[in-house]
Amino acid sequence: MILRACAVSNPFLRRLAHGAPLTAAEKAALVGLTRSTRSVGACRSLVEAEPVPRGLVVLEGWACRSKVVRDGQRQITDLLLPGDIHLQHAGLSEHAGHALDTLSTCTIAEIDPGQLAALIERWPGVARALRWSSLQTESILREALTNNGRRSASRRLAHLICEILARLQAVGMVEDGSFAWPLTQDELSDVTSMTAVHVNRMIRDLRAAGLIVLARRRMTVPDAERLAAYCDFQPDYLHLASG
Amino acid sequence: MPHYFIDTDDGNYSVLDEEGHDLPDASAARRLALRALNDMAADTLPDGDRRVLTVRVREADGAPVYAAELALSGEWLREPSGCADGGSL
């Protein structure tokens, strides 16, 4: 499927606009950067065997970065949602040290690193927005460490749902508190560092409390403030511009 | 891959697994059940001194094939000093 990347619907532009005000020329340059897209099925690897510098942007669907430990258990370290960018720098990390896989069918834009470097050089807004993007990714990882390390299971799950809701809202992909939820219980267990059995218990818990409705791969949060209050979710760490 | 159901009960909240899990064999189902006990313990154990957590593995036909329980039994050995809640929890 070819996605017509126009300024209104391109989630990459929508997301970066939270990081810096972008001029019309900068927006056009970013749209040009993400022009070459491909559709990738669910549960496919996005990492190439050869360690070449490359970048990609998720335009549709969900992907994730993960690591596998010795006994075969997987930890999903972070989710890539529409608008997120993945950069693999040459030299800095010849071996990425982690896997990069799709979780649902995705539309992926391949980015030419040379072209990206040229844009950063030429357009200060693009440079600022991409620095912001790295800052947000780092901040999300820091929150995930805290979430998985210190929050009780049901609050941990609630916090993850609040974060995803806020991130999808920031790119205009939430409708009346409802959004596509492609994660299986096994994948959710790999994100939240608990067994799929316990994930199942906690989802029932949140459902019974009326905090979430999860049906047919769609998550609905009837009262976002109530869910946020339940797990002390403070969206500041996402550094999103309000409104 | 065979399908297993893993039922859980933490003493307050009992869940009959209706969806189940695809796992390589019964011993993988046992390991998952025991790790689930561990998750339940991490969530519930500071709450009170008596607690029994149980898990049960059922095979695809619904018949139980494995069960385990983890029991906490704690008690104060004397009246504690300097304990804000009087040692009740």
Image: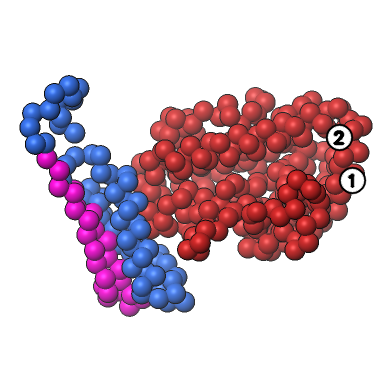
Chain colours: A red, B blue
What residue is rendered at 19% in x and 33% in y? B89
Foreground: A101 or A68? Answer: A68
Eyeballing the image, is B73 above or below A172?
Answer: below
List x then y, in percent, for residue B52: 19, 52
Q: Is residue A42 left or right of residue B27?
A: right
Q: Name the residue tied to disc 1.
A: A114
Which residues lie in the magenta part? B51-75
- How crowded pointer 1 is (Cα within 10 Å; few <14, some 14-19, many 20+) is rated as few
Place residue B83 in its image quadrant.
top left
Q: Name the residue tied to disc 2.
A: A120
Q: Quadrant of the N terminus of chain A?
A: bottom right
What residue is rendered at 11% in x and 36% in y? B76
Q: Main secondary structure of the magenta part?
A: strand
Question: Quick one: SS at disc 1?
Answer: helix
Chain assignment, label 1: A
The amino acid marked with disc number 1 is Gly
State the CA–CA distance, disc 1 to disc 2. Answer: 10 Å
